[in-house]
Image (tube, rainbow, N blue to C red):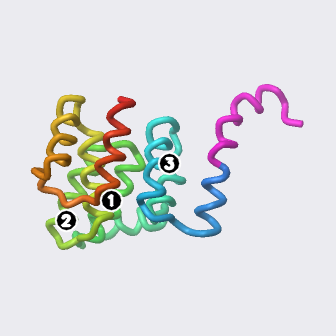
Amino acid sequence: MWPGELLIRTLTYFDVQHEINLVLVSGPRQLQSALPTIHSLLTQSSLKTLPLWMLASNEARQVAARSAFARGEATAEVYWELGLGALAARDYPRAYQLFGTALQGGAYGPRVQALTVYALFMATDKAGADRMLADLASGRSTYDVEPWFASFLGQVAATR
């Protein structure tokens, strides 16, 4: 039996133990199924490592990316990794900037597009988020995201 004080302080982390087990056993899931949980972790906890794992990164990759950047090896992959770290640290404007640089450097794919837009969405105010949603819905967005993603952002906007 846990001591009462310890039980109270750790109770909320029992909910995330399932996600820890899942990512350790199976590896990162597809973004479509993982992003709602990642979003919850980023907005409702101070955890950094689990979101990194769920984003297919870890502290060793972050250290390597920071070292490569410090040596002047600024590749799209380095910017991508640094962006994942900024996202896990809840530094959404920095994550958006780093993901954008990764895109300019040749990073591509639906995951890159989605996390870039997610970082911008989280960095902007409600009016900006509403404009982003309208642009995504109308097809005027410069980002090419999958249909599930616009729906996900709509759900996020409803809880802001």
Q: Amino acid at mark 1?
A: Leu
Mark 2 vs mark 1: give the one in front: 2
Residue 6: name its quadrant. Answer: top right
Q: Quadrant of the N terminus?
A: top right
Q: Quadrant of the C terminus?
A: top left
Q: Amino acid at mark 2?
A: Leu
Image location of residue 120, percent across then percent down = 24, 45
What separation in Å lies between label 3 and label 1 (alpha carbons)?
21 Å
> Which segment is the magenta one?
1-16
Q: Earlier in the sequence, mark 3 or mark 2?
A: 3
Task: Check disc 3 and report the residue beneath it.
Answer: 37
- Tell me which secondary structure the magenta stretch mostly adopts: helix
Image location of residue 157, percent across then percent down = 32, 34
* Frontmost residue, 158 versus 65: 158
Who's the residue at 77% across and 26% down the image? 5
Task: Check disc 2 and report the residue beneath it.
Answer: 103
Residue 55: name its quadrant. Answer: bottom left
What separation in Å lies between label 2 and label 1 (alpha carbons)?
13 Å
Secondary structure under tag 1 reads helix
Q: Amino acid at mark 3?
A: Thr
Secondary structure under tag 3 reads helix
Residue 51 lies left or right of residue 127; in this view the side is: right
State yes or no: residue 83 in magenta. Answer: no
Q: Mark 3 touching mark 2, by CB under 8 A?
A: no
Who's the residue at 45% across and 48% down the image? 36
Q: Earlier in the sequence, mark 3 or mark 1?
A: 3
Task: Check disc 1 and report the residue beneath it.
Answer: 82
Q: Earlier in the sequence, mark 2 or mark 1?
A: 1
Residue 47 lies left or right of residue 112; in this view the side is: right
Residue 6, placed above or below residue 41: above
